[in-house]
Image (cartoon, helix red, strand yellow):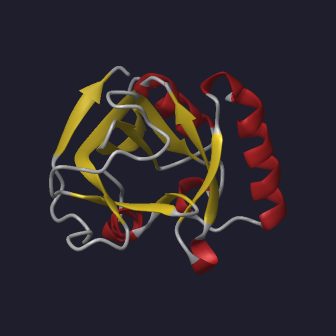
Amino acid sequence: MPDTPDLRAAFLGSTYGRAGARLRLCHAAPGVLPDWSAPGGCWAIVTAWNPAGRMADAGLNARRQAELAGEVGRWSPLPGWNGEGRWREDTLILRGVPLREAARLGRRFGQAAVVWGVGGRAALVWLDDRTAPTGLRIERLCIERLWLRRADSPGADSPGPADCGYTAGL
C-alpha cells in the first residue's frame, strides 16, 4: 500500500484508458470489458511519468515515456492517459502482458503502482519494495482487486477501504 492515503486516493480517483473509453476503478461488479481487451485477456496500464507520485519536468517525463515505449513493443501498446489537468500522464496500454512483467516495468520506471487486469476485472498493483536489515531487497506486490466502470456511468465512484493481500517474491 502507498505510504500516504493521498497517493491511494489519487490513483482511485483517477480515470484511465483512451479517448472515448475513459474508465474508473470501483468495487461494484460486474465490470465493463475495455475496448482494448478480449474476454479473458490480460492487460496493463503503465507509465514512466512522475516517478513515485512526484511531479517531474515535462521533458524528463517525455524522455522516460519514450524509453518505456521502446521496451514494450511485443505487447502491441496503445496510447492512453491517466488523470486530468495538471496530473494528466501519458500511459501505454499493454495487451497480453503478464503481471510480473507489468510490475517489473513499473518498478523500472519508479512507479508507485500499475493497473493490471483480466477482461473487466482490474487490480491496482502497489509496488512495495523494501530492504531487509540484512541488505536483501524484498519485492512485494499489494494487489487491490477491483472492477472497471465507465467514468461517466452511475456507480463509478471511487472504491472504499483496501482489499489488499501481499504476494511475496514476484
Q: Could you tell me residue 115's position as x and y percent? A: 42, 45
**Viewer-side residue, 74 vs 2:** 74
- Residue at x 54%, y 39% (from the top left corner): 106
Observer able to see residue 143:
yes
- Residue at x 54%, y 55% (from the top left corner): 52
**Viewer-side residue, 29 vs 100:** 29
- Residue at x 30%, y 43% (from the top left corner): 120
Observer able to see residue 137:
no
Tell me: 98 left or right of 66.
left
Tell me: 145 left or right of 66.
left
- Residue at x 25%, y 72% (from the top left corner): 157
In the rendered view, tell whether residue 77 sits above or below residue 73: below
- Seen as rendered, the residue at the extreme bottom is 85
Q: Could you tell me residue 50's position as x and y percent? A: 63, 59
Quadrant of the image occupied by residue 158: bottom left
Q: Could you tell me residue 138's position as x and y percent? A: 39, 27
In the rendered view, tell whether residue 73 sits above or below residue 17: above
Q: How many marks?
A: 0
Q: Could you tell me residue 165's position as x and y percent? A: 19, 38
- Quadrant placement of the C terminus: top left
Quadrant of the image occupied by residue 75: top right
